[in-house]
Image (spheres, rainbow, N blue to C red):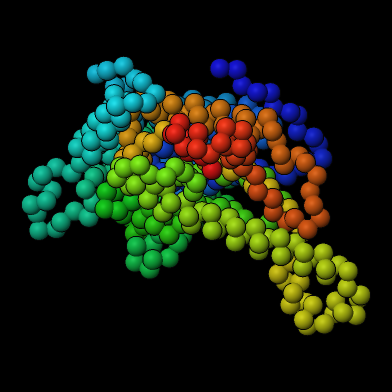
């Protein structure tokens, strides 16, 4: 498939670039496809932040030389998925649906290679009960094989941030290579979703998946001091907009989408309002005469101001057909490849449009773009929303 051309990045657009990766289990191969496109563009990130499977992808990206990152991502996703040879793959229909369900059931019963395995029956007979259904020791071995942690900690060319939650305090925590030494345990803690996966001990504290509190590290990247003007690619795996469910399976899938996307949407909207306010406070402060700038009220307001500019490019996994409530633990090789290809195609389409190169309104501290959403809206306008519903598309 021929991808659209990406326009040159003008020297005047000198923002730093960050990549923010949401959690979503097996859906994470979409993020790998997005990164493959970014690696072929003039917008290579210098900071990558992730939660859960987004944290695993982020660690693989940061822990490899630029020329090896896509291959390392491919290695990981081919390690943790298995080819399905029982029947040919079809894009939709009952046969493909049966294959997806079979792959998800296999993950529940047998785990995934290089990732997790069910605990042995004898584990449940001791006086000390396990705190998870699966053991993730295999993931540590996979991370040690694919991630150069010395490279991450030497801060060669990319910063890594991973979100988790402290089990004892319930407080959110970030493991940031700019502040601490990152180890495999930090990556595993970010993806330790209970009760499936066990908590991970780090320096005497236990941590679970950061998605329990926030499924995206966007706020951490936007709020980190000192701030830098940035173009942020936010790659989400659950969509806020979607089909009206037609059966109970679609109800369960839609419920999961809304649960995991709602906090992301609210966070994005709130930060846009906050950052626009910061930007405008700074503009107003500069208009004040010198005597007013010295007042306590003016100084208090100035502390909330910010001169940085932010552009947020959203890339959201929007499958063309319902995938069921088990989509985030459906690890078949064919589905992984399809998600990867969609991420790559969506990213190329977004990069080809490069809406962030358009002139900025003076009052805009943060601009938000979703090129694929705009394309779907145009399709709805052209074909009629009823037609889109009948075709099964996840219209906006």
Image coordinates for residue 314, horizontal then vertical, percent: 59, 43
Residue 213: percent from left, percent from top:
43, 59
Q: Please name the residue shown 11% across and 51% down the image.
A: 124
- The image quarter containing residue 37 is top right
Q: Position of residue 187 (x, y in %)?
A: 42, 46
Residue sitting farthest toward the bottom: 296
Q: Nearer the viewer, residue 115 or 362?
A: 362
| Residue at the spot 33% in from the left edge and 51% down from the top edge | 193
* In the foreground, 97 or 359: 97
Q: Residue at x 54, y 58 (%)?
A: 266
Q: Residue at x 75, y 29 (%)?
A: 8
Residue 127, above or below 358: below
Q: In this view, does 289 lie to the left or right of 389?
A: right
Q: Is residue 281 visible?
A: yes
- Give the quadrant of the C terminus: top right
Residue 328 position (above or below residue 89): below
On-image quarter of the N terminus: top right
Q: In this view, does 251 lie to the left or right of 110?
A: right
């Amino acid at each position: 498939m021929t991808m659209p051309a990406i326009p040159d990045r003008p020297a005047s657009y000198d923002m730093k670039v960050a990549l923010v990766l949401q959690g979503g289990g097996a859906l994470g191969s979409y993020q790998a496809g997005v990164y493959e496109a970014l690696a072929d563009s003039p917008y290579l990130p210098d900071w990558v932040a992730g939660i859960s499977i987004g944290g695993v992808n982020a660690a693989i990206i940061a822990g490899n030389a630029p020329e090896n990152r896509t291959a390392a991502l491919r290695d990981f996703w081919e390690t943790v998925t298995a080819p399905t040879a029982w029947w040919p793959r079809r894009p939709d229909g009952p046969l493909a649906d049966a294959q997806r369900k079979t792959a998800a059931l296999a993950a529940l019963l047998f785990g995934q290679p290089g990732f997790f395995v069910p605990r042995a029956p004898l584990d449940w007979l001791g006086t000390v009960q396990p705190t998870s259904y699966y053991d993730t020791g295999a993931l540590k071995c996979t991370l040690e094989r694919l991630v150069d942690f010395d490279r991450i900690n030497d801060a060669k060319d990319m910063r890594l941030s991973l979100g988790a939650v402290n089990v004892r305090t319930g407080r959110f925590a970030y493991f940031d290579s700019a502040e601490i030494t990152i180890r495999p345990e930090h990556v595993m803690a970010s993806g330790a979703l209970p009760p499936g996966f066990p908590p991970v001990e780090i320096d005497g504290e236990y941590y679970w998946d950061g998605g329990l509190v926030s499924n995206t590290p966007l706020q951490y990247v936007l709020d980190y001091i000192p701030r830098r003007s940035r173009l942020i690619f936010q790659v989400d795996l659950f969509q806020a907009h979607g089909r009206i469910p037609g059966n109970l399976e679609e109800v369960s899938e839609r419920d999961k989408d809304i649960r995991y996307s709602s906090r992301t949407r609210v966070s994005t909207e709130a930060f846009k309002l906050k950052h626009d306010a910061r930007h405008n406070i700074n503009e107003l402060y500069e208009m004040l005469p010198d005597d007013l700038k010295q007042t306590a009220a003016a100084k208090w307001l100035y502390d909330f101001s910010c001169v940085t500019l932010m552009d947020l490019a959203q890339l959201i996994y929007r499958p063309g057909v319902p995938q069921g409530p088990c989509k985030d633990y459906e690890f078949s090789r064919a589905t992984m490849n399809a998600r990867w290809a969609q991420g790559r195609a969506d990213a190329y389409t977004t990069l080809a449009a490069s809406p962030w190169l358009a002139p900025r309104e003076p009052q805009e501290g943060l601009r938000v773009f979703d090129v694929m959403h705009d394309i779907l809206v145009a399709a709805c306008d052209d074909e009629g929303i009823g037609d889109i519903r009948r075709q099964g598309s996840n219209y906006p």
